[in-house]
Image (tube, grey):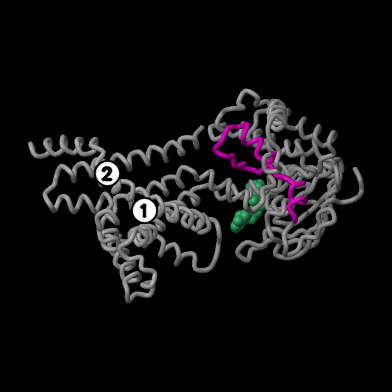
Amino acid sequence: MNDLIQGIIQAFEIILSLNSALYEIIWLSLAVSGIALLFSTVLGIPLGAAMAMARFPGRRLMTALLYTGMGFPPVVIGLFVYLMLSRSGPAGQLGWLFTPKAMIVAQTIISFPLVAGFTMAAVMGVDPQLRRQLMSLGATPWQATVTILLEAKIGVIVAIVAGFGAIISEVGAVMLVGGNIEGKTRVLTTAIVLETQKGNFDLAIALGLVLLFLSFLVNVALLRLQGRAFS
Amino acid sequence: MSPNPVYKLHNLTQTYDERTVLNIERLDIFAGEILAIVGPSGAGKSTLLRHLNFLERPASGSLRFEAFHLNGEGAPLNLRRKITTVFQNPVLLTRSVADNVAYGLKLRGKTGDQVKRIVDDALDLVGLNNLTHTGARTLSGGEAQRVALARALVIQPSVLLLDEPTANLDPYNVKLIENIITQVNREQGTTIVIVTHNIFQAKRLAHRTALLLEGRLVEIAETGAFFSNPSDPRTEAFIHGEMVY
Ligand SMILES: Nc1ncnc2c1ncn2[C@@H]1O[C@H](COP(=O)(O)OP(=O)(O)OP(=O)(O)O)[C@@H](O)[C@H]1O
Ligand SMILES: [Mg+2]
């Protein structure tokens, strides 16, 4: 118990000391997960919306695949990306393995099905008669689609929150494809694993607190967006 | 009433799961008229309105609106925007009443004070100016129906399709809505097709009345003649509430 209290006190000292290595780790975590989230949002929202609204052959199969993707073990995705990017792999020439690029690829693949799947569910929750109603008021198909997405806004934001939560806290895949290289690919989660193993509990706790605080901040920001849906 | 039809339907059919729910041999709708459509539940009245609003593809037959013949392409936007429907169960957006009424205007690129003025006037007209900023999803059935009417009126359609627009209303509001319908028709020359279960409403409002039965037009005539001197025995039975279906 004493250890824990001691650790927390020291953790705050570390956070407040403006240790530059710590801030590099924070920055890299945010950059990698932020860019991955951007990619998966740009791909996932249109796909989820299309799968909810359009009727096309193979839709059932795609839905099944998407739901599978939502629950896919991140470490398996890490392994897959590793094999793709390793020197002898099909994308080996890129030289991305053990760089932040590989981590972004892995995190995009992890969060994309979550964003698409939750978006699909949110859009399917909108009254199916709405499109007809909007078309009757003179909407173009595109205008109708945008309005329907806005009606599903709360759910779409949940989709983005879920996507972010999955990758900012993910450790297995980034460890595999990033390699946890100090000053290069070390992020909050991999640093926590390492420092805990080394017995540096104060630093591990500091990193953990920062991680919690960051995901709290991001979620508050996203929820503020959601709040406007009610007004 | 001008003699040129805005709509010309010919052998238009609609099928759902191989069941024919609409089969209109011939129907002309004239510019500036109020046409009432009556008929039992499930007769295909709402389905017919969806066709008139280009919201369905006919299984066969032809539909002409003004100079446009419906083909595989679907109707062009500028034509579609001349027609709007107040649905039997209107769907409102999760926004304020005012934003709902403004929706069609925003789609057409209108903004600012102009929109606000038009919306306020429309809400005055349907007696809902006290609810301007209320969330539309909290409205009662009758209020929602009037918002849907206001939302349709602001875009000044040349054809207004009304699917039982007073089904949820008290007598005072029925009268209010009926007055609006007559007024819009008279002052703006709007062509109106109104589906109603209320025979007296058809009598009060419509120039012509049609009976739809199992997807087919049984009779269409001047409203006076339709009720006082129907030519089909089924019309006679229907208006006296003696139809068995
Ligand atoms: N999307 C659909 N799929 C299958 N059947 C449908 C569909 N829409 C309508 N129908 C069927 O078509 C028939 C006509 O329906 P419609 O809604 O046009 O009737 P209506 O005359 O408007 O009835 P009501 O007075 O009860 O509103 C009904 O038997 C209905 O079950
Ligand atoms: Mg109906």
Q: Quadrant of residue B116?
A: top right
- For the residue marked with disc 1, what is the amino acid? Val
Tag shown at residue A216 = none
Chain on which label 1 sits:
A
Q: Does label 2 point to a residue whose CB lies under 8 Å from ligand 1?
A: no
As rendered, which of B221 and A122 lies closer to the eye? A122
Question: Which amino acid is tagged 2?
Answer: Ser
User: Is residue B22 shown in magenta?
Assistant: no
Residue A58 in the image: above or below residue B156 = below
Please report the bounds of the magenta region as a residue range: B76-105
Q: Is residue B174 visible?
A: no
In x, y percent, where is residue A28?
33, 50
Answer with left or right where residue A94 lies relative to residue A171: right
Left or right: residue B225 compared with residue A110: right
Give residue A40's quadrant in the image.
bottom left
Assign a secondary structure to mark 2: helix
Q: Is residue B146 left or right of residue A219?
A: right
Q: Which numbered disc, 1 or 2, marks the residue that appears first in the sequence?
A: 2
Q: Residue at x 84, y 53 (%)?
A: B66
Name the residue rendered at 45%, 55% in the picture.
A39
Instruction: Provide the residue designation for mark 1.
Output: A32
The residue sitting at 85% across, 56% down in the picture is B67
Residue pointed to by mark 2 = A20
* Quadrant that contains the N terminus of chain B: top right
Instruction: Please identify the residue farthest to the front as the structure is shown.
Output: A20
